Amino acid sequence: MPAKIIDGNALSKQLRTEIATNSAILTAKGTKPGLAVVLVGSNHASQIYVRNKIKACHDANIYSELINLDENTSQVDLLRIIHELNENPSIHGILVQLPLPAHIDSYSVLESISPNKDVDGFHVANAGALMTGKPLFIPCTPYGCMKMLESIEYPIRGARAVIVGASNIVGKPMAMLLLQAGATVTICNSKTKDLSAHTKEADILVVATGKPKMILGQMVKPGAVVIDVGINRLPDGKLCGDVDYDEVKYVAGWITPVPGGVGPMTITMLLQNTLEAAEHFHQ
Ligand code: GUN
């Protein structure tokens, strides 16, 4: 029997309805949640992601501002703009779309965002808070993956979880969340020897490598939950994940599709974090 699908579109729809209701309630109390999205340059993929985020805000009763800066914007000017957003009382969340142009130091930029408005959860203070088990904001993609596991009521406690990819944005925070939920966690990276030996042990397999279809059916434990974070565009224009869906669906117990899996959940959790930021501000 093929794997059951964890439908990120359907789960997002349900969660976004709840977020829209809670945003309207907070607005009626005098605080309309507000998100600023800063995009530097004209990277095509980033423009699409940003447009989707702005539209999702509108549909969730969240105020949003797009600050689209020229590719040649200096780091000093970008830091000044972020400082102004940090001080702006109608903005509760600030997101600087990555990647930034090469002449800008991304680390300094992410550190300049007030941790209280850091809805991406990338500031070192928020990364540290997550590690101690007391997060302020959970990075949106891992947060979405945890919601997907919750939606199928998967017993994480005691499960073997393997994460392929060790980025600050996905792999490392995902490992922390699974660890705190009681899983035994392995993080694999591009230097891992005999990757299959690890992936085949996984009850929960999370893949975030950016390498199209790299996880094959023979690398997956029968019945596993497979969460595919990758979004890759093939030469024929179609989207695919980091998991070979057509093979793995016959081995896994649960699988997330691409598109329509983790992607919409990432935006949903951005809305959730923005709502939470506004709720903290309102208190
Ligand atoms: N670029 C790719 N993914 C992300 C993300 O989650 N947040 C930001 N700010 N930029 C990204």
Image: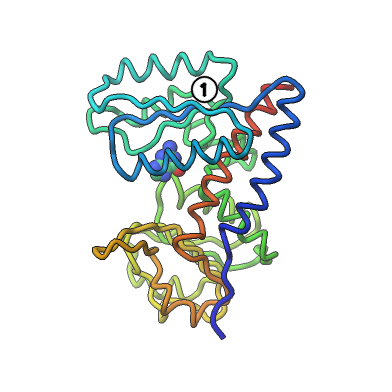
Is 97 above or below relative to 212? Answer: above
According to the picture, the residue beneath numbered tag 1 turns out to be 114
Q: Residue at x 71, y 26 (%)?
A: 27
Given the image, on which type of amino acid does mark 1 rest? Ser
Between 185 and 79, the residue placed more toward the observer is 79
Q: Residue at x 28, y 35 (%)?
A: 42
Residue 190 position within the rendered picture, expressed as x and y whole percent measured from the top left: 31, 59
Residue 103 position within the rendered picture, expressed as x and y whole percent measured from the top left: 22, 28
Q: Residue at x 37, y 18 (%)?
A: 79
Quadrant in which ligand 1 is drawn: top left
Image quarter of residue 154: bottom right
Between 8 and 192, the residue placed more toward the observer is 8
User: What kind of element bears circle 1?
Assistant: loop
- Quadrant in the picture for the C terminus: top right
Q: Is mark 1 within 8 Å of ligand 1?
A: no
**In the displayed structure image, the side of residue 212 where residue 176 appears, left or right:** right
**In the displayed structure image, the side of residue 146 where residue 68 appears, left or right:** left
**In the displayed structure image, the side of residue 93 where residue 27 appears, left or right:** right
**In the displayed structure image, the side of residue 242 where residue 183 appears, left or right:** right
How many badges with numbers are in the image? 1
- Residue with the most extreme bottom position: 1
Residue 138 position within the rendered picture, expressed as x and y whole percent measured from the top left: 57, 41
Between 204 and 68, the residue placed more toward the observer is 68
Rate crowding at label 1 as few (under 14), some (14 to 19) or many (20 or more) other CA atoms within 10 Å: some
Q: How is the image coloured?
A: rainbow
Residue 238 position within the rendered picture, expressed as x and y whole percent measured from the top left: 33, 63
Image quarter of residue 240: bottom left
Is 205 above or below relative to 122? Answer: below
- Quadrant in the picture for the N terminus: bottom right
